[in-house]
Amino acid sequence: MKIAVCLKRVPDTVAKITIGADRKSIDESGLKFVPNPYDEFAIEEAIALKEKAGSGETVVYGIGTDAAQETLRAALAMGIDRAVLLKSPGSPDGLEIARVLAAEVKEGGYDLILCGKLAVDDYNHQVGVMLAELLGLPCISSVAHLTVADGSVEAEREIEGGVEVATCRLPAVLTCEKGLNNPRLPSLKGIMAAKKKPLETKAVPVGVGSIEVLSLDYPAERKPGKVVGEGADAVPELLRLLRTEARVL
Amino acid sequence: MPANAILAVLETRDGALRKVSHEVVAAARQISTAGGSVDALAFGVSAPEGSNGVGANRVLVAAHAEFGRYNPDGFAATVASLAGGYGAIVFAATATGRDLAPRVAAKLGVSLVTDVTGLAIDGGAIVATRPVYAGKVIQKVKLKSVPALLSIRPNTFEPEQSSANAANAPAESVPVPSFEARVKVTGIKAPDAAMLDVTEAPIVVSGGRGLKEPSNFKLLEDLAEALGNTAVGASRAVVDAGWREHGAQVGQTGKTVSPGLYIAVGISGAIQHLAGMRTAKTIVAINRDKDAPIFKVADYGIVGDLFEVVPRLTEEIRKMRSEQ
């Protein structure tokens, strides 16, 4: 089984985000970066599927600057076989990212291409599905449960108030949702081995796209609230405020 | 068809329109220029119930024997085949819309802006506002492609209440192009048909570690039932601990919600949780720690033992509801 995984380097989800001087990008100084959490589900699934198949290859692709090498090494430490860094500052336009990835994985002969359902920085929530469409492959997005057997995929995806069950043939593109698996932590042996695994770097042209970032701002501060009272005795006053002041009940 | 026409892609389930469909039409109306029209596109085995009252000028019905459920390839082929006449196409940022919109975008070779919470026209271009970094930052982008493709976040665009815009729009059937169904949706497992999703419910009651053990979520389920039309959410800590399904998680790596009322129970308010609920219209916090960060964003707080406060709240709301 040959599996490709797409991986993005993003700011740590618990980090405070500071807007840069240009008001169009964030200030990255001192910011801790991590592999996109949804991409980690894709990495884990790729490794587990290869282990189950007993043979094959797993390859991780990342688009980013040299700093993304560290993120790709983290995937290698988890157990991915080799990595490809597509060097580019990226683009706010997901279609441009999908085009670069499509050109790269097209001739790879992959049975499965796994992506996170979204990246927790730009929240574009689109690249994996676009990638499938550009490659002419079937795609099931936001997969929270997966069975791969006999050249087919059966997947469950969360929808509002339920779970949708979908099937398709391989090769396919799947985007991964939380709940799919529990990503393993790299072992010491894995970390040592990752240093010797191949990490290929090549410059790629990413188009400018047709989405222009005009500005970044902090969300409006909420008006300071009030503590209505202490304990259960404060409940009637809370309800009165919700009815008459906030008018939400 | 004039290029300033906007196409609103509706969502249905079990042959009926979903609430978010009205919001999609309202968003389309916001970017339709004076004299411009909004067409709504509905999928189904036949025209969905209520689609002619959605507030669009025309309702286009793509009927197909396979369209009783979401059909990714069929829906995408249909939207793409209609795209030529429109200046913009608006989707819902729901499970279906998030799957469908990128397919259409890639087919057409145009860009897509997702999870939009605000729209404006500036110099003839659409400017969209959307939260990034899980709501820690608000991004403003200009869409330069035609058609402009965008998806709107549920619960953020107010549906028009009494629309003069064709309360009874004529329905026209549109042809469904031939397509290869590479993905087949074989069924929907509904854990509870009445279960509301946290992204769509007008009221959300969320619980965290303060509930001490999973079975205590019963307190919140009772409160939700008393309130009515209420979804039960959860913090990341309790989802990671396996107490609640991931679908209920509010915050980064979970869902971002904008209900009219958000009640946080036993949630301290980690930065990544606050990011997911700070756009709620009114926030109530119930927590025993008066210094918990959740009180900084809450409009109303009660400091106290949730095991006393929540049952009392449920009881008082039941009383209130029975008097209404």
Image (cartoon, coloured by chain):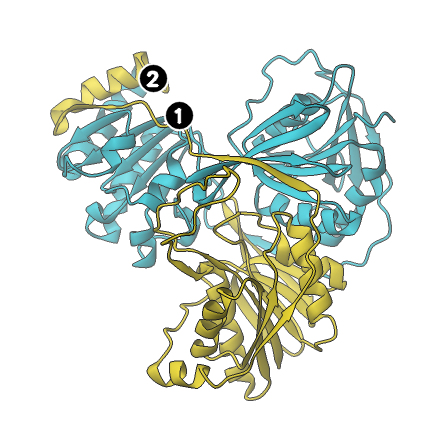
Residue drawn at (40%, 41%) of the image: B276
Q: Nearer the viewer, residue B37 or B52?
A: B37
Q: Secondary structure at mark 2?
A: loop
Give the total of numbered labels: 2
* Corner quadrant of residue B266: top left
Q: Amino acid at mark 1?
A: Lys
Residue A175's x, y, as percent? 58, 60
* Corner quadrant of residue B127: top right
Q: Nearer the viewer, residue A236 or B106?
A: B106
Label 2 marks which chain's residue? Answer: A
In this rendering, position of residue B270 left or right of residue A186: left
Quadrant holding the N terminus of chain A: bottom right
Quadrant holding the C terminus of chain A: top left
Q: Amino acid at mark 2?
A: Ala
Residue underneath mark 1: B281
Residue drawn at (78%, 34%) of the image: B61
Check contact, mark 1 vs mark 2: CB within 8 A.
Answer: yes
Residue B17's x, y, as percent? 63, 33
Categorize mark 2 by other alpha carbons within 10 Å: few (<14), some (14-19), many (20+).
some
Q: Which mark is residue B139?
A: none
Residue B272's x, y, as percent? 35, 46
Chain A visual colour:
yellow
In this rendering, position of residue A176 left or right of residue A223: right
Residue B284's x, y, as percent? 28, 29
**Measured along the vertical axis of the image, is residue A108 above or below residue B274?**
below
Q: Which chain is cyan?
A: B
Residue underneath mark 2: A246
Categorize mark 1 by other alpha carbons within 10 Å: few (<14), some (14-19), many (20+).
some
**Measured along the vertical axis of the image, is residue B285 above or below residue B44?**
above
Q: Secondary structure at mark 1?
A: loop
In this rendering, position of residue A16 left or right of residue B82: left
Residue drawn at (63%, 69%) of the image: A113
